[in-house]
Image: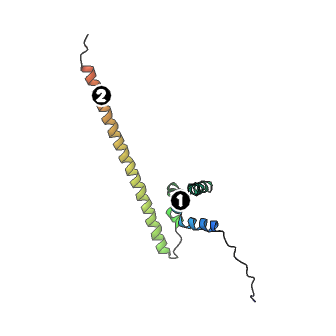
Amino acid sequence: MSTYAETPTPRLSWLARAETWLDEKGKFAWIAAMVLGMIFFWPVGLAILAYMIWSKRMFSKSCANRRIHTPMAHFSSSGNSAFDAYKADTLRRLEEEQTAFQDFLQRLRDAKDKAEFDQFMDDRAGRTDKRDSTPIEV
């Protein structure tokens, strides 16, 4: 006889086990399950899509949310303070480089847009000049 009370572990239904397994694999596993459900029997795929939207699995952990959080929030301490300081400094530097690069790309897009607009205005001015210089016959 055992000295401690043995409590039976509750068996999860196959649906709950499938949900847990898909959650462990991530959002793309859910999407793959939905696509396969659509292919083999469309109501199943539709039900998975509805469940993903209802449970907010479809919109959680998106790319936009990842940019808001600092990378340090996702990493735990290694136990070595020198390495943790190095890692924090490297991640901060990489974030600064990413921000600088995104700013550079924005300036590049702005310059391209300005050049295209200036070209449009020059072309438009050239067409207007041609119309003004043509004699009007009466």
- Report the side of 120 relative to 16 (left or right): left
Image quarter of residue 33: bottom right
Colour convention: rainbow
Name the residue nearer the viewer: 82 or 70: 70
> In the depicted view, which residue is nearer to us: 63 or 26?
26
Q: Secondary structure at mark 2?
A: helix
Q: Is residue 134 depicted above or below 112 in this figure?
A: above
Q: Horizontal and vertical percent for residue 11?
A: 68, 73
Q: Position of residue 59 (x, y in %)?
A: 56, 55
* Vertical arrangement, residue 92 with respect to residue 84, above or below: above
Residue picked out by circle 2:
125
- Camera-side residue of 96 and 55: 55
Residue 111 sits above or below residue 122 on the image: below
- Label 1 belongs to which residue? 40
- SS of the residue under disc 1: helix
Horizontally, residue 94 falls left or right of residue 27, namely left
